[in-house]
């Protein structure tokens, strides 16, 4: 870390997908010395030579000041690292990354999901593989292309250390990229993980032609599932109602720009999960997260009917229309239940 006003001048981005590239673009625009690591050498070359991530974010021109690499060692001098690799790869990538870092470099979780093999939030994963590093979370209602183009957005930035949190807000904040500080690291992760599953449900409903009223119902009742699930992990209810909860849920369930909603829509239209995934070079995290969310819901006896419907469609191969009709036929209950 450097002086008090620029303790996070050098920002590293671990992950060269669309969201990692968008965050790198925002950090560069904020005046940070930004280095993006991409697994694919061709992505790093594309960014360095043509100022564009032609594989994952085509058509968006990037600042020439943004530099990219495919060597983890080139992140060694960074003051903070934003982790933007797929959730299920976080353990492996963080384990490799910290070999090149000082012991107190903050790690900012920017991926959304729960580790399927352990049921741990990504903060729990980092506590195991990077125990000396401060952990933060950046999450909220964002589409990568809009962020990379400098269109306005607001996000939650959660940190238990206020000095680190405020330092990151100062380092990354822009009039068009507005971080709102929180202490609720757990809550900031819950909304982002569960909303991917719920977005698949809204996509299925759209693919079946059930209408906008049904989408609004899924979003609203889905929020109740987010709150129930968050309570198990000790998440604050107000976080669930904020940018990383309700805000992210609304955005992801409202547009086929969302990989999860578009996946659900294709299933509702009759395509198979295997065929959809084979056509894509990006990850729809909800298709993985639903496994562990369903298991936890069953183990904890949580009422999460929308999540269970998505599980039955994706993992048990049930007919989407039959599952949705069963969901609609559930007994009537009070709204606060």
Image (cartoon, rainbow, N blue to C red):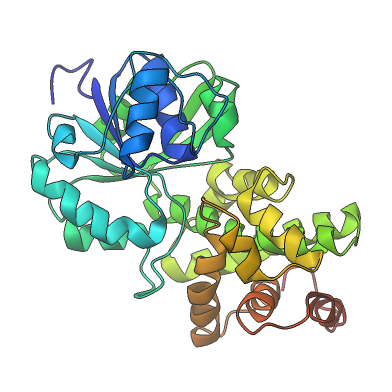
Q: Residue at horizontal 64%, vertical 62%?
A: 276
- Which residue is at 49% across, 31% downward? 54
Q: Which quarter of the picture shows residue 64? A: top left
Quadrant position of the N terminus in the picture: top left
Q: Is residue 147 left or right of residue 202?
A: left
Q: As displayed, is residue 158 above or below residue 235?
A: above
Q: Position of residue 15 (x, y in %)?
A: 35, 42
Is 136 left or right of 180, judged from the image as shown? left
Closer to us: 113 or 219:
113
Report whether 96 appears left or right of 206.
left
Name the residue rendered at 73%, 83% in the picture: 318
Left of 332 or right of it: where is 255? left
x and y percent of residue 8 in the render? 23, 24
- Vertical arrangement, residue 35 with respect to residue 158, above or below: above
Q: Where is residue 187 shown, x and y percent of the image? A: 46, 54
> Which residue occupies the foreground of this view, 299 or 251?
251
Seen at 60% across and 21% down, the residue is 151
Residue 233 visible in the current orientation: yes
Quadrant the C terminus occupies: bottom right
Q: How many marks?
A: 0
């Amino acid at each position: 870390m450097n002086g008090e006003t620029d303790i996070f001048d050098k920002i590293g981005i671990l992950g060269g997908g669309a969201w990692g590239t968008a965050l790198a673009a925002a950090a560069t625009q904020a005046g940070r010395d930004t280095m993006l690591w991409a697994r694919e050498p061709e992505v790093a070359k594309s960014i360095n030579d043509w100022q564009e991530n032609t594989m994952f974010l085509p058509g968006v021109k990037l600042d020439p000041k943004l530099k990219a690499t495919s060597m983890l060692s080139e992140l060694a001098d960074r003051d903070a690292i934003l982790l933007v690799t797929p959730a299920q790869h976080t353990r492996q990538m963080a384990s490799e990354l910290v070999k090149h870092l000082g012991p107190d470099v903050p790690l900012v979780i920017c991926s959304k999901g729960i580790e399927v093999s352990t049921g741990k939030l990504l903060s729990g994963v980092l506590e195991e593989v990077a125990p000396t590093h401060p952990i933060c979370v950046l999450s909220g209602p964002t589409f990568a292309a809009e962020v990379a183009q400098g269109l306005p957005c607001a996000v939650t930035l959660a940190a238990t250390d206020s000095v680190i949190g405020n330092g990151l807000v100062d380092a990354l904040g822009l009039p068009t990229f507005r971080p709102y500080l929180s202490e609720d690291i757990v809550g900031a992760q819950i909304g982002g993980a569960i909303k991917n599953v719920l977005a698949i449900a809204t996509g299925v409903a759209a693919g079946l032609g059930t209408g906008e009223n049904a989408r609004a119902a899924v979003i609203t009742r889905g929020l109740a599932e987010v709150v129930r699930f968050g309570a198990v992990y000790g998440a604050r209810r107000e976080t669930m109602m904020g940018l990383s909860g309700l805000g992210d849920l609304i955005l992801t369930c409202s547009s086929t720009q969302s990989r999860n909603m578009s996946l659900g829509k294709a299933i509702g239209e009759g395509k198979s999960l295997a065929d959809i995934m084979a056509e894509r070079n990006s990850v729809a995290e909800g298709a993985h997260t639903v496994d562990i969310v369903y298991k936890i819901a069953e183990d904890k006896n949580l009422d999460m009917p929308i999540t269970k419907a998505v599980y039955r469609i994706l993992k048990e191969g049930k007919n989407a229309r039959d599952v949705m009709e069963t969901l609609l036929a559930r007994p009537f209950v009070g709204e606060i239940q």
